[in-house]
Amino acid sequence: EEELNDFMAQNRVDVSKWGQGTYRSIAEFSEELVKGEATLIKGSDGQIVRVVDIVVLKIVNAAGRALVEVEENTKDVTQARKRFPAIKRRSDEHQFAAARRLISKCLLMDENAVTIDHTLVRIVEELQESTSYHGIKTLYRKRFMTAKFHEVKASV
């Protein structure tokens, strides 16, 4: 963490507000980098940019209704959300493996009950100020996928 703090200071990133309010800490940032959930690059202006690759999964049932995340709980704070389930793709992870991890580990759904459409993946990149880490821009690379939910019949 000390080396990361030094690196951020050398690149003129003010981390003084990190770990306060809704901002995540330098320890959480370090963990995110170590896990491969984010990387750092130098932007065209020489500034450090955090890159986060996100897999967004629209899961639709037979009636055409989609699964939507309505709220998120972090650090005793509940934030209203209206978005499709998503997960950070690790740098060593294939996009469909990340989608499967989202289904099984986060949504706690049977992987066999969800069929991902492998033919349609839309990638959108957005550069914006980070909502998690004050003072650093983040390039969000979002991979939008669709999937169908179907009932899995129990074997007898």
Image (cartoon, rainbow, N blue to C red):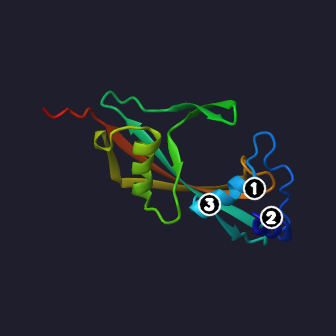
Disc 1 marks which residue? 26
| Marks 2,1: beta carbons within 8 A | yes
Disc 2 marks which residue? 5
Disc 3 marks which residue? 38
- Disc 2: CA contacts within 10 A as few (<14), some (14-19) or many (>=20): some
- Disc 1: CA contacts within 10 A as few (<14), some (14-19) or many (>=20): many
Closer to us: mark 3 or mark 1? Answer: 1
Q: Amino acid at mark 3?
A: Ala
User: In x, y percent, where is residue 91?
Assistant: 53, 64
Indicate the secondary structure of the residue bearing disc 2. helix
Mark toward the start of the polypeptide (3 vs 1): 1
- Disc 3: CA contacts within 10 A as few (<14), some (14-19) or many (>=20): many
Mark carried by residue 155: none
Decide if residue 131 is on the left or right side of residue 33.
right
Quadrant occupied by the N terminus: bottom right
User: In x, y percent, where is residue 3?
Assistant: 77, 69
Quadrant occupied by the C terminus: top left
Q: CA distance from mark 2 to mark 1?
A: 7 Å
Decide if residue 99 is on the left or right side of residue 89.
left
Q: CA distance from mark 3 to mark 1?
A: 13 Å
Please say if 7 is above or below 120. below
Decide if residue 103 is on the left or right side of residue 56.
left
Q: Amino acid at mark 1?
A: Ile
Q: Residue at x 30, y 31 (%)?
A: 62
